[in-house]
Image (cartoon, rainbow, N blue to C red):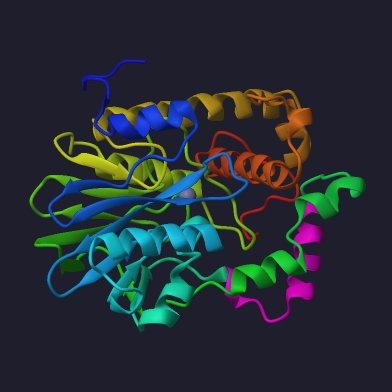
Amino acid sequence: MQTDAPAITITGTAQKEAWQRRVMPPIELVAPGVNSVPVVFPDNPMRYTLSYVLVDGNECVVVDPGFDSEEGHRQLLSALADLGVGPGEITGIVATHFHTDHLGMAARLARGSGAWVALGRQERRHISAFEDAHEESALDQSRMLGWGVPHGRVAEAAMTPEGLLHMRQLADPDRRLGDGDSLSVAGRTWRIMETPGHTPGHICLWDDNGELVLSGDHILPRISPNVSLEIRGDTDPLRQNIASLRRIAGNDHYEVCPAHEYRFRGVGHRARVLEEHIAERSREVLHVLGKGAPTVHEVARRLTWSRGWESLGQLQFRLALSETAAHIRYLVTSGAHAGVPGLVLAD
Ligand SMILES: [Zn+2]
């Protein structure tokens, strides 16, 4: 692909080395008052969430506290103790998005400290919007059937009542943050930028000094963040994601502090690479659709998957389907294809 920006430069070199050695990266002082703390993400290939602890004399704000596990909780509290912050002294918690490896531990930390919890203004808490988990799960199962998932695999693809109830335990936000909002902590003013795509209300935090951006999962140095049509269908998450990638380009002097993997510089280059991946995948999806694949499941089955379609089970199976659905939706709203049954815009 063509790009006018230089390739990315890894700045989190100790983090990258740890990634390659498959060990937890160190706790690091990224800039005065800005600490990077890895929090374990058990049984997940991402291995950990990079939580950012912003501290000054009066405040301690934790951005993306990570997945709620006993070990992760211990890791975070011990890092806070080293910074001279007791568990009751956390003043605020920001999650870049609602996923459990970001917002997960917020509820527990807030209970122990009375800290406020903030989420993006557009983050629809659709996961807690349902009245009845069994009814919601049944709805999702019929949706999976509509996507052409074979009967024998519907239970594997659909959200279970237990899974939905688990999601409901996530903290509800006391504050909402969006474009135009800012947070002052650690001697910096952090401007909020809405970057929907990975989730409908994903946000990034830009430091007004022009040094750092806390980018959540919007942009990562190595992998393409998943963009899915979620349980209560987003209209066109891939289109939103492309717009969000374009929004953050042009800020190459910032050091990107992502929530996984390692820090780097060259956000513009990375955004263009990610956009090109999306375009490439879209071309593949359109090609498969053109051969007459009749359902979301059938399209997904005929796409290339890095570890092979047969290896995708449980959550990975669901994500493959919802990623494919997001691509089909994008092709429909682009006018490139009429789509497939079971994936209509009113979904
Ligand atoms: Zn994540």
Closer to us: 333 or 251: 251
The vertical placement of 117 against 47, above or below, is below
Closer to us: 294 or 271: 271
Which stretch appears magenta? 127-145
Could you tell whether 279 is left or right of 253 in the image? right
Could you tell whether 32 is left or right of 51 in the image? left
Q: Main secondary structure of the magenta part?
A: helix
Q: Please state the horizontal and vertical placement of residue 305, each as a whole percent of the image.
A: 66, 26
Could you tell whether 115 is left or right of 40 in the image? left
The vertical placement of 347 against 170, above or below, is above
The vertical placement of 216 against 332, above or below, is below
Res. 18 image quadrant: top left
The vertical placement of 26 against 41, above or below, is above
Q: Please state the horizontal and vertical placement of residue 64, each as a whole percent of the image.
A: 38, 59
Residue 196 on the magenta segment: no
Residue 138 on the magenta segment: yes
Image quadrant in which the C terminus is located:
bottom right
Q: Please state the horizontal and vertical placement of residue 290, each as a whole percent of the image.
A: 68, 25
Closer to us: 92 or 155: 92
Q: Residue at 36% across / 84% down in the picture?
A: 114
Residue 150 in view here? yes
Q: Residue at 67% across / 25% down in the picture?
A: 307
Res. 346 image quadrant: bottom right
Q: Residue at 59% across / 76% down in the picture?
A: 129
Q: Residue at 34% across / 69% down in the picture?
A: 93
Could you tell whether 163 is left or right of 99 in the image? right
Res. 339 image quadrant: top right
Q: Please state the horizontal and vertical placement of residue 2, each as a whole percent of the image.
A: 31, 15
